[in-house]
Amino acid sequence: VQHGRYLVQTTGCHDCHSPKVEGMIPDLKRALSGRPSSTPLPTAAKGEVHASLDLTAWQGPWGASVASNLTPDAATGIGTRYTEATFITTMRTGKKPNGTMILPPMPADVYKNMTDDDLKAIFAYLRTIPAIRNAVYAGLPPPAAAK
């Protein structure tokens, strides 16, 4: 768990998956809970990437993406949808258990190269943080499953 905490803190997970209280300071009361419903999608512009001010939502050539809720909340977080094995598979393949792809700016290529022990440590740590009910797609159309 402590190694997972270290990896979450040093690989920048809070940069995108935690709402901010001021500037780029993560709101640790909502740590790793993903895009708040109060954060609108940024505007889209051809050939550009735009981010919300709290870095939890983006628009780019791939379309719109939002930061996932990584807390163990059963309804809106990784909760019961992920086991250690499905978490590792997601990080290795870039595809979530529901079939949707992990979209930019998530550095999936970084995580797919981590060792199984590192990914297990991250998952173990994520299971220990407070569960926060936060539907990151609230007010947005859900992403399409990969074909």
Image: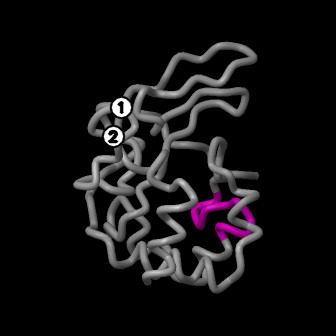
User: What segment is highlighted magenta in the picture?
Assistant: 90-99
Task: Answer left or right for 22 relative to 55.
Answer: left
Q: Which residue is drawn at 50% across and 76% down?
A: 4
Query: Can you tell which quarter of the image residue 20 is in?
Result: top left
Q: Residue 122 carries which label?
A: none
With respect to residue 40, does 30 lie above or below?
A: below
User: Helix, strand or loop at disc 2?
Assistant: strand
Determine crowd level at label 2: few under 14, some 14-19, many 20+ residues with C-alpha closer than 10 A. Answer: many
Measure the alpha-carbon separation of dots 1 and 2. Answer: 7 Å
Q: Identify residue for label 1.
A: 23
Q: Which residue is drawn at 40% across and 34% down?
A: 54
Task: Answer left or right for 24 relative to 133.
Answer: right
Query: Can you tell which quarter of the image residue 132 is in?
Result: bottom left
Seen from the viewer's position, the closer of residues 128 and 61 is 128
Residue type pointed to by label 1: Gly
Residue type pointed to by label 2: Lys
The number of numbered discs placed on residues in the rendered structure image is 2
Q: Position of residue 118 (x, y in %)?
A: 62, 79
Residue 104 among those drawn in magenta = no
User: Helix, strand or loop at disc 1?
Assistant: loop
Q: Is the magenta stretch mostly helix, strand or loop?
A: loop
Contact between marks 1 and 2 (CB within 8 A): the answer is yes
Colour mapping used in the image: one colour
Q: Where is residue 98 in the image (x, y as percent from the top left)?
A: 58, 62
Q: Which residue is drawn at 38% across and 72% down?
A: 79
Q: Where is residue 37 in the image (x, y as percent from the top left)?
A: 32, 37
Q: Which residue is drawn at 50% across and 56% down?
A: 13
With respect to residue 98, does 126 lie above or below?
A: below
Task: Answer left or right for 11 relative to 138.
Answer: right
Disc number lying in front (1 or 2): 1
Q: Identify residue for label 2.
A: 20
